[in-house]
Amino acid sequence: MITLHSDKIIISKDECFDPKAIFECGQVFRYTCSNDVYTVYAGDYCATVIEQGDCYEILTSNVDYFYTYFDLATDYNMIIESIKDKPLMKESLIFGKGLRILRQEHFENIISFIISANNNVPRIKGIIERIAKSLGAFHGSYYGFPTVKIMANQSEEFYKSLGAGYRASYLLSTAKAIDYGFDINSLEKLDTQNAKRELLKLKGIGSKVADCILLFSYSRKDVFPVDTWIKKVYGRLCNNEECVEKMREYLIDLYGEYAGYAQQYLFYSHRSSNGATISIN
DNA sequence: TACCAGGTGTGGC
DNA sequence: GCCACACATGGT
């Protein structure tokens, strides 16, 4: 059961909701964890998730926003039911029990996944944190994510100084494109293929990053981001060499309507069980 | 030290 | 259209 109050959302543990799986599965980078208490920052908002007996509580002054953010209106039991018999899903669903796909801010998610290219999670988190701290609005105890305009008005050298490396030029170019009128909200109205075609026009966004953005920020489930870990999963499934586009097509076809969810459970379980660094903070 | 990490852009063919 | 290669950075 999920109940909304003025300052918190209470979620009983028989719901599909596990903060560790949700935050550490690699879909979001701006969160902290201390003594199993997670605090997440989204745009200019913030929420803290605590365990309270047989419930989890999301403490926030923006209940409606985080009800949507955590995708609490979606029935995950139905989704899990539809993918549980697919290849490799049994172990991944057990490992990632309680994982949900968040509905993240478009701009923040776009910037985050441009940074993610050929990078590792702890480093991605660090770069995003430094961007928020140096350009975001201060809200008493935390920094929001900067606006498009503020990001567009920096220099390439500035992003390099934050550790973005060669992605610095992509960040600036994409922030400027959006500032100059590339309408990221209008993509919501497009079908997945056309929305992807638009995203690919932005610097630093290739096929894989576009799929991540569509999955984590536009709630598209008919995508399958293929990264280094998913390539290993494909190797387990098919035991042959194939180009990335062929892999993507095959995996979307194999996992069906909810391929995007399946992908995230697979990514989380394989990345974690193969010794990838899981950040403590 | 070479290799890896939620890959992409570019130039040559 | 396909392919090889360069690309910052920090951890192992």
Image (cartoon, coloured by chain):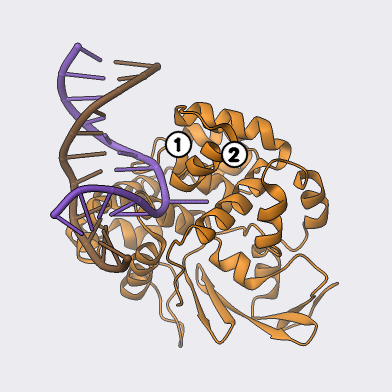
Chain colours: A orange, B purple, C brown
**Residues flagged by tags 1 and 2 on a common chain:** yes
Badge 2: few (under 14), some or many (20 or more) residues near its Cα, within 10 Å? Answer: many
Q: Quadrant of the C terminus of chain A?
A: bottom left
Q: Quadrant of residue A7?
A: bottom right
Badge 1: few (under 14), some or many (20 or more) residues near its Cα, within 10 Å? Answer: some
Name the mark on residue A277. none
Q: Which residue is mark 2?
A: A223
Q: Position of residue A189 (x, y in %)?
A: 62, 39
Residue A75 makes an appearance in the image: no
Q: Nearer the viewer, residue A176 or A130?
A: A130
Q: Position of residue A89 (x, y in %)?
A: 69, 48
Horizontal arrangement in the rendering, residue A174 relative to residue A34 (left or right): left
Q: Amino acid at mark 2?
A: Val
Real-space CA distance between mark 1 and mark 2, rounded to the nearest whole angstrom? 10 Å
Whether A82 is drawn above or below A245: the answer is below
Residue at (46% x, 28% y) in the render: A241
Q: Nearer the viewer, residue B5 or A188?
A: B5
Q: Quadrant of the N terminus of chain A?
A: bottom right
